[in-house]
Amino acid sequence: MENAIRNAIIKFEQEFMGRGPDDVRASIVRDLVVVRLKGVLTPAERQLAKTAEGVEMVKQLRQNLIAQGRDKLSEQVGEIAKAKVLGVFTDIDAQLGEQVFVFTLDREPLSGVR
């Protein structure tokens, strides 16, 4: 299940951001799905992230793009987890080039899955 979520996130990143991350790890912790993406920035975003103003621009751009794809992403994760996604939280560290997604679910996907 974690691998399927990982693959869905990679596909989302490729479609919405124009390129996939270098590394993606997904973990299920009770009723949470936590996804860590490394190497997410495009070359243009890396240039922007060299200044404080640019970091804020990258964060805002990413937040806007994710907002546009939020429903699709929630649906995909929900289908894989066989649970309803209640919320999607994300943040990016533009200096590290890492992004984190946290999906809250209405229940645990499967008993005993961590």
Image (cartoon, rainbow, N blue to C red):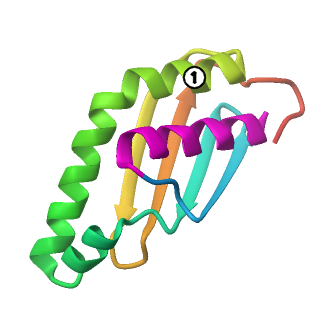
Q: Is residue 1 left or right of residue 112?
A: left
Q: Main secondary structure of the magenta part?
A: helix
Q: Which residues are magenta?
A: 1-18
Indicate whether residue 17 is drawn in magenta: yes
Looking at the figure, which quarter contains the C terminus?
Answer: top right
**Which three-letter amino acid code belongs to the residue tagged 1?**
Gln
**Vertical placement of residue 64 versus 55, above or below:** above
**Vertical placement of residue 24 versus 64, above or below:** below
Q: Residue at x 60, y 46 (%)?
A: 34
Among the 4 quarters of the image, the one containing residue 81: top right
Near mark 1 (Cα within 10 A), the count class, few <14, some 14-19 or many ≥20, is: some
Residue 107: percent from the left, percent from the top? 67, 20
Among the 4 quarters of the image, the one containing residue 88: top left
Residue 102: percent from the left, percent from the top? 51, 43
The residue identified by callout 1 is 76
Residue 58: percent from the left, percent from the top? 22, 62
Secondary structure of residue under mark 1: helix
Q: Residue at x 55, y 39 (%)?
A: 11
Q: Is residue 70 left or right of residue 98?
A: left
Tally the numbered discs.
1
Indicate whether residue 25 is drawn in magenta: no
**From this viewpoint, which residue is outermost toward the bottom?**
50
Residue 39: percent from the left, percent from the top? 50, 69
Q: Would you say residue 86 is visible in this rendering?
A: no
Q: Would you say residue 73 is visible in this rendering?
A: yes
**From this viewpoint, which residue is outermost toward the right?**
112
Tell which of 27 and 62 is nearer to you.
62
